[in-house]
Image (cartoon, grey):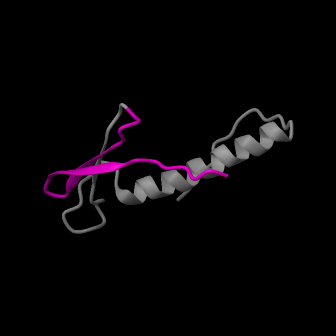
Amino acid sequence: MEPHYFNVNLSWISDRKGEVSSPELEDKIEVATPPPFPKGIEGVWSPEHLLTAAVNSCFMTTFLAVAENSNLNFSTAKPKVN
């Protein structure tokens, strides 16, 4: 299998905020220190949100591939990670 590469850039905006982008994608994601930490900012995606989102979306896409290859039928999928 060939290696897969995913380009991600991070630019500091101000204070404890940054912006994640990728040359392959149009949308950018604002990120910041989460509220539980000193000077954390509410209402902005944190590295912790992005990490758990990555794990959860990896699980979902793997499940969907296995289900498709196994001809499994299901009506909904809403995995949740805390």
Quadrant position of residue 15: bottom left
Q: Position of residue 46 (x, y in %)?
A: 34, 55
Q: Which residue ends up furthest to the left in the rendered image? A: 14
Callout count: 0
Q: Does 23 sit above or below residue 37?
A: above
Looking at the image, which residue is at 49% across and 57% down? 52
Viewer-closest of 32 and 35: 32
- Apparent side of residue 78 relative to residue 46 in the rendered image (left or right): right
Q: Quadrant of residue 28?
A: top left
Up-down relation of residue 49 to residue 66 (above or below): below
Q: Position of residue 18 (x, y in %)?
A: 23, 51
Q: Is residue 16 left or right of residue 57?
A: left
> Residue placed farthest to the front in the image?
2
- Residue displayed at 21% across by 53% down: 17
- Does the magenta run of residues contain 57? no
Towards the viewer: 36 or 46: 46
Residue 40 visible in the snapshot = yes
Q: Is residue 80 left or right of residue 37?
A: right
| Residue 30, quarter of the rendered image | top left
Say left or right for 71 vs 20.
Answer: right
Q: Going 55% across and 56% down the picture, which residue do you hit?
A: 55
Residue 33 drawn at (x, y percent): 27, 60
Residue 80 seen anywhere in this rendered image of the structure: no
Residue pictured at 71% horizontal, 41% vertical: 64
> Which residues are drawn in magenta?
1-25
Q: Residue furthest bottom?
A: 38
Expressed as whole percent of the image width and height from the top left, the position of residue 22 reads 36, 41
